[in-house]
Image (cartoon, rainbow, N blue to C red):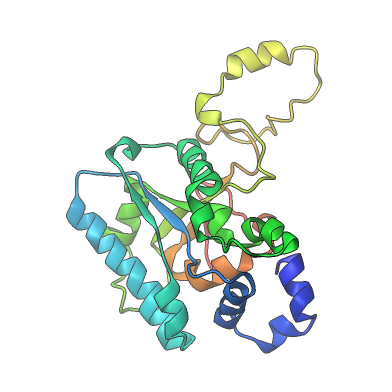
């Protein structure tokens, strides 16, 4: 949980409340009307498949998880995916989506913040709410994993086949955009340096050689509310991280 919010609630709070209650209390603490991840649609050409994907996502989260499991219809009603659809996003990289998301956080997202919060809450609101630190990237592979391979949304998907790409975009992520990175130039620049902080010796994933490439595949079934609630604590990304492309984070 986040420092300011957890300090307000006390040490026993998480033991005495459900995940859904914790999210609702976080919204109340900051007087926010919306929660949920911003989704970037990065595959086009099949609107029927996209509509199927959104039906699956909404059923898994709003109806099954929030209403049936947690009995929290009010929280389900305030869930807002804020889907970004633009043909210019077709085939967009994770870094490109991160750039666009950060622009939204710095501008459009501010309309969601209460204007009369005290100084501490104004400072911590964008830090402690996952909506403003992480976003979802849906490409052809993740779309197909949900539409073609996952079980129907009214069936229990024990194998958790459907996933989306969850992108980290918090302020502590200060690495370069590897979709534009010139490794050859970097090699020349680092000739006299023993260790390159941008190269951790990992297999290259979309230009990145870091252990943490700044995004991971997350199973749709656990996305809301479990992953969202977990990410209210900034350090929990490291605890739950699964390096793509072969690993999928399942909760």
Residue 25, image quadrant: bottom right
Question: What residue appears at the point 53 percent right and 48 percent down from the top-left corner?
Answer: 105
State the image quarter where residue 161 is shown: bottom left
Quick one: quadrant of the C terminus? bottom right
Q: Tell me where residue 175 appears, x and y as whole percent.
A: 65, 34
Question: Who is closer to the viewer here, 250 or 105?
Answer: 105
Q: Does residue 250 lie above or below 241 as drawn? A: below
Would residue 67 be found to the left or right of residue 227 on screen? Answer: left
Q: Quadrant of the N terminus?
A: bottom right
Q: Say which of 2 and 160 sits in front.
A: 2
Tell me which residue sits at (67%, 15%) in the image. Answer: 187
Where does the image place residue 73, in percent across and percent down from the top left?
42, 84
Answer with the quarter of the image where residue 197 lies.
Answer: top right
Q: Left or right: where does residue 115 sit relative to residue 138?
A: right
Q: Where in the figure is residue 9, as x and y percent of width and height?
A: 74, 80
Residue 157 visible in the displayed image: no
Depicted 138 relative to depicted 188: above or below? below
- Between residues 154 and 75, which one lies in front from this camera angle? 75
Observer able to see residue 87: yes
What is the residue that sits farthest to the front in this orientation? 116
Residue 143 on image: x %, y %: 32, 53
Who is closer to the viewer here, 245 or 29?
29
Residue at 46% in and 89% down: 71
Question: In the image, 98: left or right of 12?
Answer: left
């Amino acid at each position: 949980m986040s420092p300011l919010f957890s300090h307000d609630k006390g040490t026993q709070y998480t033991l005495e409340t459900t995940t859904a209650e914790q999210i609702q209390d976080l919204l109340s603490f900051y007087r926010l009307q919306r929660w949920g991840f911003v989704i970037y649609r990065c595959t086009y050409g099949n609107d029927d498949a996209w509509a199927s994907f959104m039906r699956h996502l909404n059923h898994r989260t709003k109806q099954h998880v929030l209403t049936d499991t947690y009995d929290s219809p009010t929280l389900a009603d305030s869930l807002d995916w804020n889907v970004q659809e633009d043909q210019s996003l077709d085939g967009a990289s994770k870094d490109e989506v991160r750039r666009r998301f950060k622009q939204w956080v710095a501008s459009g997202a501010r309309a969601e913040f209460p204007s009369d919060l005290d100084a501490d809450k104004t400072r911590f609101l964008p830090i402690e709410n996952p909506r403003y630190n992480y976003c979802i990237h849906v490409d052809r592979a993740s779309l197909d994993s949900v539409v073609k391979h996952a079980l129907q949304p009214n069936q229990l998907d024990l194998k958790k086949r459907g996933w989306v790409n969850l992108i980290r975009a918090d302020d502590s992520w200060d690495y370069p955009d590897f979709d534009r990175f010139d490794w050859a130039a970097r090699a020349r620049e680092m000739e006299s340096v023993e260790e390159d902080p941008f190269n951790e010796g990992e297999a290259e994933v979309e230009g990145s050689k870091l252990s943490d490439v700044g995004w991971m595949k997350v199973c749709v079934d656990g996305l809301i509310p479990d992953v969202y609630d977990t990410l209210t604590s900034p350090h929990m990304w490291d605890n739950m991280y699964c390096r793509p492309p072969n690993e999928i984070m399942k909760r």
